[in-house]
Amino acid sequence: MPAYPPLSLHIPEPPGRPGVPTDFSYLKVSPAGAVRRPPIDARPDDTMDIAESLVRVLDDDGEARGPWAPAADPALLRRGLRTMLLTRAFDARMLIAQRQKKLSFYMQSLGEEAIAIGQALALAPDDMCFPTYRQQGILIARGYPLVDMMCQLFSNPRDPVKGRQLPVMYTSRAHGFFTIAGNLGTQYIQAVGWAMASAIKGDTRIVSAWIGDGSTAAADFHNALTFACVYHAPVILNVVNNQWAISSFQTLAGGEAATFAARGVGNGIASLRVDGNDFLAVLAASAWAQERAHRGCGATLIEWITYRAGAHSTSDDPSKYRPADDWARFPLGDPVARLAQHLTRIGAWSDAEHASTQAEVEAEVMAAQKEAESYGTLASGHVHDASMMFDDVYRDMPAHLRRQRAQAQGA
């Protein structure tokens, strides 16, 4: 007789499915203010307890608590709230535009706005960002024109990238926003390389890199961590754990056995696990990580716990794989509502101002959309000249490409 029973393969399952309410106890939520704040130059192994807990500042009443509570200027918080409202309004209008066939594809950041915007406000304006497709809040926080974003979505003659990218895959060197790639994970190792180059040149700019929970299973994630550790790269390695990678729950990327933040510690990188729907916690953790990078203390990995409130994209139907009321039941709440509650509590906001600001940002988005649509949309039938694919590749175009372009133009 064999000494052991037959083997069986473990397949992780999500804690909720359509018709079955999600049990969110797996999140391991710490009380607001309960997690310690280590010194900036802490050893990576001294952050293991933080990688397993959850940094939170705002309690259920909107009061800031604990050692991570930032001494933030209310004006900065008001700016953050307005930018979140603007981003949410932008997303809502572009989702409608996609349904009207004015663009082919769209991806919202609904429910995740605090992470990108909070970190953008904690960084210097010229720090470099290597984003994924759900960090449009960085561009908006840095003042990138909404009209330019929309023209890229509509792929019209004013498209800044001349029709060479899918919608939502923005790029802006002037705003420190590296070109978004559809090949998930590649930006992580590129960001570490950029950070290493900044250090080699004796520059003062650091890097913010972004990846989703599902993409942590890609080799680029692990390669990036190795280089960031070995060379003390001045980089913030953000892991946005919004619980779902398209239709696969985060446990299929390894989130069941350990936190994603713990992977940073295991690779010799100081790591934090943070409430991504708490704008004050986002500001504080981002400021801690950026100071660590500037002081030469190395990289920081931050796992942001949040929830993807909408569909993965306009090609996705989340009702097929998760309960319809999940976001309403998510224990970390809505980042917009939580920051508004805090500002109201300290006398820097009101319901009336919230309503007027909401109307103001919606008008701003609608005005930008009207202008962008005046240049055309996908529905207007504009197609970029195919010969443009040869432009902007080489400084001096080789002869064989000049011949091919002439052929494409029918010359």
Image: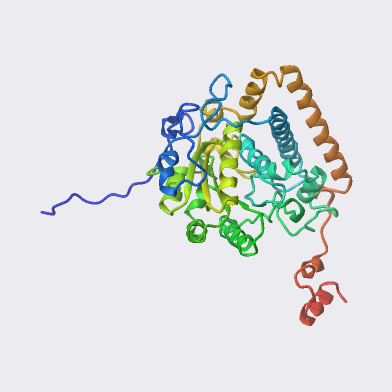
Q: Position of residue 345 (x, y in %)?
A: 64, 18
Q: Quadrant of the C terminus?
A: bottom right
Q: Quadrant of residue 27?
A: top left
Q: Nearer the viewer, residue 17 or 229?
A: 229
User: Left or right of 12: which side holds 287?
Assistant: right
Q: Position of residue 383 (x, y in %)?
A: 82, 58
Residue sitting farthest toward the left: 1
Q: Quadrant of residue 384?
A: bottom right
Q: Position of residue 115 (x, y in %)?
A: 61, 39
Q: Quadrant of the N terminus?
A: bottom left
Q: Nearer the viewer, residue 309 or 270?
A: 270
User: Left or right of 311: which side holds 124?
Assistant: right
Above or below for 174 versus 247: below
Residue sitting farthest toward the bottom: 399
Residue drawn at the location 79% of the way across and 31% of the way down:
362
Q: Position of residue 256 (x, y in %)?
A: 40, 42
Tell me which colouring the rendered structure shows.
rainbow
Count of labels shown?
0
